Amino acid sequence: MFVIRMVLKEMWHRKVNVVLAVLAVTTAVAFSIAFFTAAKASDRETARLMLSMGYNVHIIAKDADAGGFLINGIPDKTMPADYVDKLAAQRNISYNHLLATLEGKMNWRGMEIVLTGIAPEVCPPGQKKPPMTFQVDPGTVYLGYRIAESLQVKEGQTISLGGKDLKVKKCLAESGGLDDVRMQCSLRDAQEILNQPGQITGIKAVDCLCFATGDPVVTLRKEIAAILPEAQVLQVKAIANARAKQRQMVHKIFALMLPFVVAACGVWIGVLAAMNVRDRQPEIGLLRALGYDAGAICLLFLGKAVLLGWVGAGVGFLLGTSLGLTYGPGVFEITAKAMIRWEPSLLVFACVLAPLFAVVASVIPTLIAVTYDPAATLREE
Amino acid sequence: MLVLNDLGKTYRTRAGEVRALHGVSLRIDEGQFLAVRGPSGSGKTTLLMMIAAMLRPSRGTVQFDGTDVYAISGPERARFRARNIGFVFQMFHLVPYLNVVENILVAQGARGQTEGARARSLLQRLGLQHRMYHRPGALSAGEKQRVAMARALLNQPRWILADEPTGNLDPENAQCVLTCLREFHRAGGTVIVATHSPAAQELDARTIHLREGMIEEHGA
């Protein structure tokens, strides 16, 4: 089509206008991609940082003494281990990272310790995420700092616990909490040692209610009661709130900054389009005089906007992702490698939204161009 | 046949109303060569624009073959212009980013299909075959006007309207443009030229003189 050829030739002719417009689209796309990537990485980073504070949801047996659990950190009743599978089988629920544990106090070499058996972490369908904690292989054990220090146990040694031999996989760093007197082994090993086959004392989880309205614990209890009426739910509010507030804050910052950047770029494109229309008044007058209708004039300007959008989308995607890959690891030290990567789906979004954005920004100048009176334009010349 | 009936145009400006054309009635038969003469500001360009279906009159009608061109819709009027009228302007109005061939083909762009071969043949006729792929910036004024002439001729219009086509040209190039218009006329086309060029006096044309928006006299 001749008009398309005109669009391409005009873009080649007015390079400065094109470069500035592409820069505006690129800025908007790069910021959007960088914000999106950073928000995602920030969410994950927050989750990982909060890991050191532990899971924020505890599901224990209904008849367990909740007060005793809060005092001792260990539930006094067990429940079937397959409860975790029931929870993990649910769709569209508000929790994730389900970790079944069996805990019990025992005496080992004259020292009172907590033995914790850990099952591999499971996620409900469609919510698969990297595990938040380490996985303990059967036959191995992780020792808390105090145990290793007091009893002079080293990594690689084999210890005997409740008649079972376990190899010390790791001696953990000092935590200043209960973990320092904890031995962590696989769930099956703990069930054997504590003589509780097929049993667990609790399920730890992380809620996904950072952006929900209302009291999250009410929502959680309602959901879990429907699946597991034989369980009770406790939420560690301090952890849950810290996690929710941190994530909300990051999202609020992005939600506030992004519209400003996008609006500024939109105005920038609009001004450039208006300048382009003004520069091309005689040409528009000529085309109208030669019988070009309003649609052709619109195509001349909006077609250019679409092309600018596509170029800006490509460059912006490359720039935004490159910025994320370059500076992300410095900001998100724990999760950058896993979370900041090339996302082709974002390029698809950019290729759809950036031309739309450029078209919207160019609409008013285009409408002005369409309404130019050819006689007035040509007479003025 | 073109019939102008009591044509008038008043522009509203900040300083007040300006009467550009007043009570112009004229009949131009197919195949005529009409020269519209008059001093600057006498309404020549306004008259041409109104005949070209580009400027709605404040009063009166412009009828081509019995059809009032301002009674039809805007898109229909645009199609009418593209089919029937070729323009030549004093300032050439070439598109700066298109080469010479493309500047000629612009006249057919509105139709969605272009005839490159015809454009090249017109350029050859006008002695511009060596300039086909140059941009307007590289052309002399005479060459630019010849390109504009080729553009006007591309669609084989019935009418050519030329507004001071020789106003910016040296005598040699002016003569070339007028020869081209004469050839179009001889081939059966209708030409209306607004001009005050001395060279135009040699045209064997019916002449009208405009003064202050009114026809002052009909010449031969």
Image (cartoon, coloured by chain):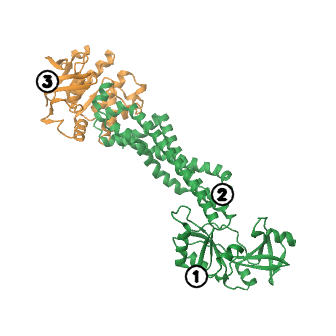
Chain colours: A green, B orange
Q: Which residue is disc 1 drawn over?
A: A230
Disc 3 from disc 2: Cα separation = 82 Å
Image quadrant where residue A64 sits: bottom right
- Disc 1 residue type (three-letter): Glu
Residue A375 in the image, given as x and y percentages of width and height: 27, 30
Question: Farthest top residue?
Answer: B198
The answer to which of marks 1 and 2 sits earlier in the sequence is 1
Position of A115 relative to A54 (above/below): below
Q: Say which residue appears at 41% left-offset and 41% top-offset.
A: A362
Q: Which residue is disc 3 drawn over?
A: B23
Q: Secondary structure at mark 1?
A: loop
- Disc 3 residue type (three-letter): Gly
Disc 1 from disc 3: Cα separation = 99 Å
The answer as to whether the residues below labels 1 and 2 share one chain is yes
Mark 1 chain: A
Left or right placement of residue B5 versus residue A276 in this view = left
Q: Callout 2 environment at 10 Å: few (<14), some (14 to 19), or many (20+)?
A: few
Q: Which one is in front, A73 or A281?
A: A73
Mark 2 chain: A
* The C terminus of chain A - image quarter: top left
Disc 1 from disc 2: Cα separation = 40 Å
Q: Which one is in front, A347 or B149?
A: A347
Q: Which residue is disc 2 drawn over?
A: A337
Residue A335 in the image, given as x and y percentages of width and height: 66, 58
Q: Secondary structure at mark 3?
A: strand
Q: Which one is in front, B114 or A54?
A: A54
Q: Answer yes or no: is residue B108 visible.
A: yes
* The N terminus of chain A - image quarter: top left
Marks 1 and 3 in Cβ contact (< 8 Å) = no
Residue A253 in the image, given as x and y percentages of width and height: 56, 50
Q: Say which residue appears at 67% left-offset and 53% top-offset.
A: A329
